[in-house]
Image: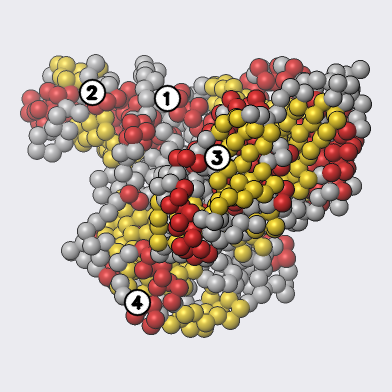
Amino acid sequence: MIKELEYYAARDLKEALKLAEQYGSRKRFLSGGTDVTVRLKEGLVKEDVIVDLSHVAELRFVREESGIVHVGACATHADLSASPILQQHGCALALAASRVGGPQIRNMGTVGGNVANASPAGDTIPALIVLDAVVSIASHKGIREVPIIDFFTGPGRSVLAAEELVTELHFPATGSGELTGFGKLGARQAMTISTANVAFYFRIGDNHRIVEARIAFGSVAPTVVRAHKTEQMFCQLPPVLSWDAIRGAAQMAWKEVAPIDDLRATAVYRKEAVVGLLAEAAYEALASCWHER
Amino acid sequence: MDDIHFEQIARVDAQGKACGTTAYMSDLSFPGMLYAWFVRSKYPHALVKSVDISKAMALDGVVTVLTAADVTGFNGFGIVNPDMPVICGDKVRYMGDTVALVAATTERIAEQAAALVEVEYEVLPVVDDPIEALKPDAPKVHDKGNVCLHTLITKGDVEQGLREADVVIEHEYRTPRQAHTALETESGVAVPEADGSLSMYAGSQYAFRDQLQLARILGINPRMIRVYSNPVGGGFGGKDELTIQGGIALLAMKTGKPVKVVLSREESLVSGWKRHPFIVRTRTGFKSDGTMLANDVTCYEDKGAYSSLGGPILNLALEHASSLYRVPNTRHEGWAVFTNNGICGAFRGFGVPQVLFALESNMDEAAEKLGLDPVTIRRKNVLYQGEVSPIGHTLRTGVSMDLVLDAVEKSDLWQHREEYKKTDKPWLRRGVALSLAPQGAGLGVGIPDYGGAYIDLDRDGNFTLRIGLVEYGQGTHTGFTQMAAGLLHVDPSRVRIVAGQTEGSVDAGPATASRSMYTASNAIAAAFHDLGVKVAGALDAKYHTGADAVCEAKDGGMTTPAGFRTYEELAQEFSQESPLRGEGYFVWPTADREIPGAAGLPHWIYSFAAQAALVEVNTLTGETHLLKVATALDTGRTVNLQQVEGQIDGGVAQGEGFALFEDTLIAKGQVRTKNLSTYIIPTVQDVPEHEYIILENPEGTSALGVRGIGEVVMVPVIPAVALAIHDATGVWVRQLPATPERVYRLLHPDVQ
């Protein structure tokens, strides 16, 4: 049942922060509204004040400055998917954003909302984690920075305080010798919540080996998780395109996830499927620099 | 009629629908209109001990709250057996059952009031499996027990046939509870008129039957009810039976105000009609050369809580359980069993997809065991006109099983399947398989299957075609327009249609059972003929040109005994007071005798299609993508190719949904897939590329040679997808939908 709400459309960041200070835990931020409106309809929004951020133009940007990519919280998934900066300097994030929902959802939903919503199935989150993103958080008191890996505390929960707002995400721009990618498993090709998802970052050394790997899985634990043991396995791979070897390395993922049964899939299947999801996405990416012997 | 040329015109309703100006019944508003809310059951199975409406009535803005005692006529509806209460008085049998009805000044107040209705229940144990429900100690959904219908049809000696077989394929198959997911949910407005009558505006598939059912519910003369049911925002069978009409009719009559309801998607998915899930147990015997010897089939149909069309659906499934293959020994048995799993009713295909998934799978497995290819084994067994069907009736009308099979074999997809199956990714496997299906059209023997149409020559020399059959997306009104215009020799723009109204259009039976185009072809042709008679009669009355003179349509007019007259001239002369009206009536030909013990069987006219499917299976995740489908379809005669292809596109998508995605999950009577984020239908990203092969073997009993095609286009694709997964991976799919997890577990049987 839709309930009565107070609604404020913030004109700028300053006003948004003032409203956040004023209403505290009574307020809920709405950016694209693709999650909040669904929850409102289901009666799951306990707050009674909505602060709409969709008019805060200063938070809608993607730019690169001195080797750092800055993504504004109100940049939409469509913005991210189409961003030449991300395609060059943060490919996994563009790919992840392009797999969110369908065109209508991507035109409305924002990366800040995806992060602040803190769903374990959020598609941009694994990508931001492997890109080593930092979350900029603002409040009337000032700005603090939190590495994204420390941002989430549980399903739907994060370190954000009631008066705080995610303003941007920033991460080192990737360049030559760095591969990033994203894979998603859902019930269909589009308009689907991830049954499991994966993002990876590989830095290829002069010896063609992977010298640094970052891998993150979504929808297979209470929060998105890094897979450090699996990363080590990838760093030990010989620089040869071998399906068996890549799949073998991905197999370690099985030990790093703790999924549950839900309507979308069983825990057992999720554990099996994330291995395949990583192997497939990594093989496709590594095929660009490794060759079969 | 061979001289009639059908121009490939755009849909007559295209502009309104593309621009959003078409007013569906759910778009209508009336002054002083109230909003209804259906108070649904809290339990899937319970006795209703008391209903207290006092708090709800006290809420500001609430106009009335009705309980079972307020039903003025008979408190039940159902096309075959009216066993579904409009408002439950003593018992609820599924989560969508209505225990009270609210009318209020706003939708929000109505919803709030619904929450204030206090119902005391005595919870009963839930029965949620049709086989369990058949056991003598199972909880009873209805007092008479859980068997809605039991049918047994036998021919020859099935046990002897199985003994003589070189290969017997024995398996159990399971099929999903598919939801229609029409864009327009169950909705409408009931408007009480000053004279005490009622106008019902609600999209549905048969206004004239709705009128009778509503009259029974209200306890008033059917003439006091007018139903407007066209256009419909999607049907697929889900609006064949009544849905919300009974409830809003009662509220409107009680309050004297128009009452509207539009169900939310969630409420629609919980309370609405669904496709019956089937458990199909089969033993199919073949000789070593592939000849079928015997087929033993037992179907358990999960009826859900109320009868609706579950009996006829079971029987149509049993009619098709051995397809139209030459099987000398058959035993087709079926049980339609009541459970607390929602409600099931008519759905495109009407039982046929369920049984052909089983049979066609057995066919491919036998072929593999016997070293035959899928085309050869089918070709060896297909029946021809004049032969005896597996349920014992002689096939007297055209049979195109061999023709659609030959055509799909010649498709690009089948011819080049080895190339299509190539993939360079180590984790992907591609497969191609084919299947074919007949689909009985019309209502069957013993059920009067009638169609009427009027063609009015209006004052301005244009025409109004009055016919009951509604447009719910199929494109039939474009087809009707073209057929009428073709017969009249006028441009289609000169024919307008009035349909789906108990006043202003003519009863032509339900828009179901692949019967609209065929029925209309004969009813319109009869009306056209009668218009010629009327013109001759009018001329004779004025000019004494002879009562038996024949008028023929030609170039925008008619050649008459008084010379050529344009329609404008005829209208000027004879249609100024009231239109000259051609009336056409037609009754479907049916079999001369019924199959003993199987109401409605056999059917007389069939549709035919064969489909080949290319799938790609991700062996790492079990994800299956349907990449390409070739459809060979016999239209009899194509009236509008774009609409035929549209039906194929939509049918394939709906078949794909059945095969790969769609299932209403119900646990202990509770629906778990309540919206379109959990009830998964294919999106445009999932639907395949199409190859169309259209055959035109005129159906001799249609004045214009047409056959119905709306259902059969979704049937063969279902087994074809399942069998293509086998071709790709080697595993046999016995339960649909083949979700990623289900396929993954078939590929990795060691995973617990």
Give how far across and how far down residue A107 sits, in percent: 50, 38
Of circles 2 and 3, the one toward us is: 3
Q: Chain of mark 2?
A: B
Q: Nearer the viewer, residue B440 or B615?
A: B615
Q: Which residue shows up at 74% across the image and 22% down it?
A: A176
Q: Nearer the viewer, residue B269 or B415?
A: B269
* Amino acid found under the numbered disc labelled 4: Leu
Splitting the image into 4 quarters, where does residue B170 fall?
Answer: top right
For label 4, the residue is B59
Q: Which residue shows up at 43% across the image and 38% down it?
A: B473
Helix, strand or loop at mark 1:
loop
Splitting the image into 4 quarters, where does residue A95 fall?
Answer: top right
* Amino acid found under the numbered disc labelled 1: Val
* Labels 3 and 4 in the same subunit: no
* Amino acid found under the numbered disc labelled 3: Gly
> Vertically, is B485 above or below A19?
above
Left or right, B194 with reference to B68:
left
Of the numbered discs 2 and 4, the one sitting upstream in the chain is: 4
For label 2, the residue is B550
Helix, strand or loop at mark 3:
strand
Quarter in which the N terminus of chain B is drawn: top left
- Label disc, if present, on residue A72 of the rendered structure: 3
**Disc 4/disc 1 C-alpha distance (Å):** 56 Å
Give how far across and how far down residue A60 sits, in percent: 50, 38
Examine the rendering and report whether any part of residue B419 can be seen: yes
* Amino acid found under the numbered disc labelled 2: Val
**Disc 3/disc 4 C-alpha distance (Å):** 47 Å
